[in-house]
Amino acid sequence: MRSFLEDAGLLQSDRIVEPLEASEEDLLVVHSESYLNSLKSSEKVARIVEVPAVALLPNLLVQQKLLYPFRKQVGGSVLSAKLALEKGWAINIGGGFHHCSAHEGGGFCAYADISLCIHFAFVRLNISRVMIIDLDAHQGNGHEKDFGCDGERLSAVLFCCAYFCSCYYFIARYHLFFSSRKGLHFGHVQFWNISF
């Protein structure tokens, strides 16, 4: 994706910031230690990513080739939130793991980066309200499980797309977090489903 955007002249290499891998300390902000330990089982990861063959792989390989890139994407999500506040906007072309909540993964989502970013925005960036605009073609239920009843600080607008995107757009000026996922009505938070 990066080379395609650079070759097309849509992205300048001096505008790219390489994220760090989300540390265990970062992940423990939203996940329990027992959940993170469960990812040391290839069978558990296979169920989360919905690829049965992953269960047959040694967990060291699963950690290196699957979960490490996921953790880098989580790091990119958090970095994008921080950069958006500093620069006005930022894009993370990874992340958006909308099926993972604090307590369970699923739908190819092992880490709850959306919930982590929301928590990061509230605690570290001093943002009092966020909006998630979810552009995937199906329900993103992870962050809704974690924040669905927090209508004071969280709103979500849902869009159904015929294509799959995986970009986060963080626009700090308006404190909006745009994720490329779709959600549902949960608790007393306002969710709008707009198909196009």
Image (cartoon, rainbow, N blue to C red):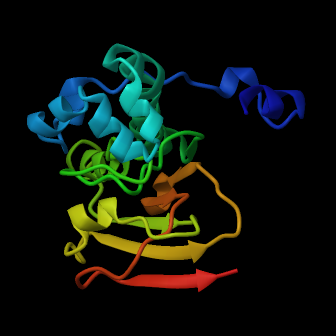
Q: Is residue 188 left or right of residue 70?
A: left
Q: Quadrant of residue 29?
A: top left
Q: Is residue 75 visible?
A: no
**Left or right: 127 with respect to 4?**
left
User: Residue 117 at x, y = what percent?
Assistant: 34, 47
Note whether 2 is above or below 115 in the view shown.
Answer: above
Residue drawn 42% across and 65% down?
A: 140
Image coords of residue 132 (percent x, y):
44, 65
Q: Residue at x 10, y 34 (%)?
A: 33
The correct choice, above or below, for 69 with respect to 116 in the image is above
Q: Quadrant of the N terminus?
A: top right
Would residue 59 be found to the left or right of residue 10 on screen? left
Check the picture and name the quadrant holding the C terminus: bottom right
Examine the image and state in which quarter residue 85 appears.
Answer: top left
User: Which is more toward the observer, 38 or 195?
Assistant: 38
Position above or below: 187 against 34: below
Q: Position of residue 133 (x, y in %)?
A: 50, 67
Q: Residue at x 41, y 73 (%)?
A: 156
Q: Locate residue 81, reporting x and y percent.
A: 43, 44
Residue at the right extreme? 8
In the rendered structure, the answer to whether residue 37 lies left or right of residue 69 reads left
Residue 156 visible? The answer is yes
Which residue is painted at 42% across and 53% down in the image?
107
Front one among 152 and 93: 93
